[in-house]
Amino acid sequence: MKMPQLSRRRFLNHLSLGASAPILLPLLNNIALGEEGKVAPLRFLFVVEGNSVPPQQVCPIGIPFIEREQRNGYVEHSLDGSTLPTALKPVEQFRDKLTIVQGLSGRMCSGGHSSDHGALGAYHANQGRSILAPTIDAVLGQANPGIFENLVLGISSNAKKVVDFNCSAAARGRSLATLLHPSVAYERLFGSVAEGEAKASFQARSNLLDYMREDIKHARRELGSIEKEKMDAYLSSFETLQSTSKRLVEYRDTLKEVAPAVTDKYSSTVETDRLDAHFELATAALIGGLSNCATISSGVGFPNFNITFSGLGITTGKHPMGHALYNEENHDAWEMSEKIRAFHFQLIARTMRKLQSMPEGDGGTMLDNTVVVYLSDGAETHHSRCFEWPFVVLGDANGRIKSGGRYLQYPDYGTKGHRTINALYNTFLHAAKIQKNDFGHMDPNLDESMHRGPLSEMLA
């Protein structure tokens, strides 16, 4: 894979590294980016957890929580002097990069148990049956691709399920596959440097693609014009896979450095092990430049949200837990959901620490050029109507998003100054230097201005 070039003097210097030069070259190039005035790629990690995020669970202690219906205007608080809630305590060390966003609506989505693709697409997905447009992670990944435009990993309530189509979409009518087995994801990402079965599978797939490509070309000659168009679409897909496989082989030295060690958690049926492994894979993929946009879905989509986090000692599924969240006489469900949410943020914090340890640019790190976005596919409550959609954003996109340590609270639905999830996604697009102001579909009951443009309170 072609890398950004160092100056001739630096190139000669790193030649003295000898055999280690091919492995260290990507890192040296990243360090040199700042010195040569080049900008490192902006990366995104979307973490989507199923079964809602109650707004109170991301409100710091010391900042008054105001019920949605009572919010009359925009309010902003500094996180200084406050205590992060249980769910967010794992990212305490990144408080200065933390922005909590309350009050955005997403009524153009389906709501209910899950908004499926609508959560990242800002449209009514009809339980994944209506893929009306690309989702925000796909748009960002396509604008700045690595070897893979996007990486979508996740866990489901069905531990035997290998793939799902539940939250991301590359285009209208084209859902992206969510890889549910860490071992399958590992083979796809790092098969060119894998050993044993993963290596054999990668090689077999590469050989098979050669045969299939020739077979398709042969069959195409026997088809009519309409059938040829359909066949060309298949051929294009196979050629893309072929190209990806070749690039992985060319990138082998770098992959050896970033590929995680395969442990028992890669084949485990325990949901916490699988989620742990997926975060590990996504982190390695971002560091290795395999993709600049990764999405991790945790029990997203109907009926996958009814997952039981037995690895945390919890025996209640998230479906009955969701029904019991607001039981005033028994707070067990609330405490269990906080425990599960905190586990997700533990894994987010681990990824951020790893990125922070990787030098990039002029004295910076990879974390400086990474934004982590946490949300639920079910907005604010178990049977959501999407009047409010809490978000947690970590990172400032190397100064393109205003510094964190802030709690932003937008006014109630329909009130002057109210904004929708579209505006937040427009903000991410602007941070990625994509001047788009109309992402997603509109809520017909709201003024168009509430959807359009970035959030001025977030964009630097």
Image: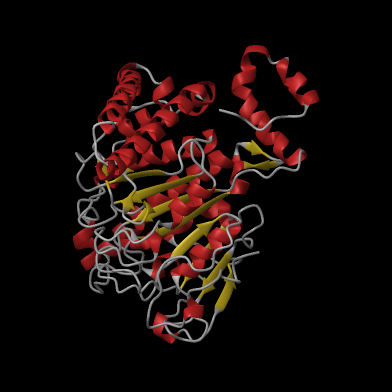
Q: What residue is at 61 percent from the left and 60 percent from the top?
A: 401
12 horizontally vs 2: left or right? right
Return the x and y of residue 32 as percentages of the image width and height: 72, 34
Which of the two residues, 100 or 242, is positioned nearer the viewer here?
A: 242
Which of the two residues, 428 or 259, is positioned nearer the viewer here?
A: 428
Q: What residue is at 44 percent from the left and 68 percent from the top?
A: 421
216 horizontally vs 430: left or right? left
Return the x and y of residue 78 as percentages of the image width and height: 60, 69
Q: How many marks?
A: 0
Farthest top residue in view: 18
Occupied quadrant, residue 158 = top left
On the question of residue 64 being in view, the answer is: yes
Which of the two residues, 230 or 443, is positioned nearer the viewer here?
A: 230
Does 167 appear above or below 260? below
> What's the coloring here?
secondary structure
Which of the two residues, 457 or 264, is positioned nearer the viewer here?
A: 457
Return the x and y of residue 339 as percentages of the image width and height: 34, 55
Return the x and y of residue 273 as percentages of the image width and height: 32, 38
Farthest right residue in view: 9
Quarter of the image for the C terminus: give it: bottom right
Does 159 appear above or below 432? above
Q: What residue is at 35 percent from the left and 50 percent from the top?
A: 297
Occupied quadrant, residue 178 = top left
Occupied quadrant, residue 240 = top left
Quarter of the image for the N terminus: give it: top right
336 horizontally vs 98: left or right? left
